[in-house]
Amino acid sequence: MKVALITGVTGQDGAYLSEFLLKKGYFVHGIKRRSSLFNTDRIDHLYQDQHENNVKFKLHYGDLTDSTNLIRIIQETQPDEIYNLAAMSHVQVSFEMPEYTANADGIGTLRILEAVRILGLSKKTKVYQASTSELYGLVQAVPQSETTPFYPRSPYAVAKMYAYWITVNYREAYGMFACNGILFNHESPLRGETFVTRKITRAACKIALGLQNCLYLGNLSAQRDWGHAKDYIEAMWLILQQEKPEDFVIATGVTTTVREFVKMSFAEIGIDIEFSGKDENEKGVIVGLDVELLSSLSLNADNLYLGTTVVKVDPKYFRPTEVDLLLGDPHKSNTQLGWQPKYDLPALVKDMMLADLQLMKKDEHLKNGGFTTLNYFE
Ligand code: NDP
Ligand code: GDR
């Protein structure tokens, strides 16, 4: 039985990858952080009681900032494959926590590679490093491929740049099977709530249900190459199944603005939005309602009015330095890995909207039933 170790197992990708590897028959070890609240929501359905026989999924407390802890876990688990997905992954937050981001995202990767080397596992253990399209940063060329120069534009991207090169270096210096997947943005119903796509799909559903009035966003003109996380975790695995260790771009080859993502999300539930105004004064207004679609989703059109402003710009979401345009060239992964995404953008938006609609309806029922969040401090 193959053994995998996933750092960042409680995150979006960690959850999908765990499920995928368990289905493939792997024993999956995951590293989770100690937290004062439960932080395993995304993987609770995979939990196995450790007292049972035949357990194939095990969690270990750990942190990418703690070398001795990582060395012990890797020694104990003797993994065939390590997927290093743990990171402080929010670009805007990295401007507020640059030093921590460098430590966890940059040096954290070194700690994993060095643990493998120190433990004499260089020939046994393959390492996947979660590299990112944020490395391209300030546009040098489009579409961006494995040979496009990097120009990182945030503390997050700079930390990930170190991680990218230290992975390449350990491959070249010690002959390790260490690879970078340069993944473009990938989303899903499990996406963290403060990334722009999930923020939009949650807000669109809440607005339709009368639970929120307005969605505040930053740069609406940013363009991203958005894919589905379910497709992207499969690429991670394929990268480690190749004969030779190499780096791969994983992307759809289609780019879209944040503005368009907003329109698509609202349209999915029968609300047409039009944008007008410029920069900080741009706003999104309801210009059409598909009453049939709304009612087929059990949404009450009486909550919604033509002419209502439902999207506004709040400059607090602008970044000190922005990445304006990401568009990946997936040629190498399409041909060499045989990887093709199953979801296009409309299918991704639909998946996220349907999931969030269900979630928000639950909130609505709780609210209507008189249940509110308990406040222990009152
Ligand atoms: P998430 O933010 O959803 O998950 C990040 C995971 O890392 C969580 O499990 C988090 O734990 C954990 N983590 C954070 N800091 C530490 C630390 N110091 N030590 C141990 N664990 C830590 O990210 P995604 O799943 O979306 O992304 C996975 C990886 O891929 C990340 O490295 C990200 O930077 C990278 N990436 C993501 C892309 C995307 O579009 N999603 C694109 C390209 C790269 P906790 O749950 O406790 O917070
Ligand atoms: P990104 O994702 O920075 O590309 O990093 P995010 O969804 O945060 O931003 C995408 C674009 O949307 C613009 N934007 C907003 N972003 C957020 N979060 N909130 C807003 O209100 C908002 N309004 C506009 C941003 O300015 C940006 O241009 C993600 C992360 O998963 C990284 O870990 C990963 O490496 C990259 O994708 C590829």
Image (cartoon, rainbow, N blue to C red):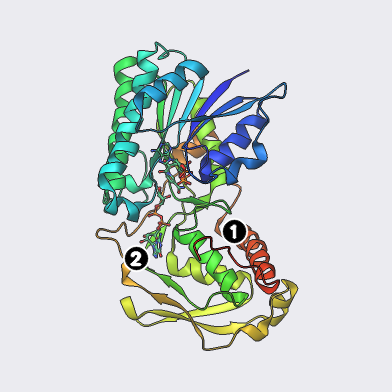
- Marks 1 and 2 in Cβ contact (< 8 Å): no
Seen from the viewer's position, the closer of residues 61 and 14 is: 61
Q: Amino acid at mark 2?
A: Tyr
- Where residue 232 sits in the image (x, y, percent)? 52, 42
Which quarter of the figure is the N terminus placed in? top right
In the rendered image of this protein, does residue 288 appear above or below residue 24? below
- Where residue 323 sits in the image (x, y, percent)? 31, 56
- Name the residue: 31% across, 43% down: 101
For disc 2, the neighbor class at 10 Å (few under 14, some 14 to 19, many from 20) is few
- Name the residue: 56% across, 88% down: 306
Disc on the earlier residue, 1 or 2:
2
- Based on the displayed image, in which of its 4 quarters is residue 131 positioned? top left
**Direction from residue 284 to residue 17 in the image, left or right:** right
Seen from the viewer's position, the closer of residues 235 and 107 is: 107
Q: Secondary structure at mark 1?
A: helix
Q: Quadrant of ligand 1?
A: top left
From the Cβ of disc 2, is ligand 2 less than 8 Å away?
A: yes
In the rendered image of this protein, does residue 12 appear above or below residue 70? below
Q: Secondary structure at mark 2?
A: helix
Pointer 2 residue: 317
For disc 1, the neighbor class at 10 Å (few under 14, some 14 to 19, many from 20) is many
Determine which of the numbered discs, if any, sits on residue 352 in the image.
1
In this view of the protein, can residue 278 be seen by the observer?
no
- Name the residue: 54% across, 46% down: 229
In this view of the protein, can residue 333 be seen by the observer?
yes
From the Cβ of disc 1, is ligand 2 less than 8 Å away?
A: no
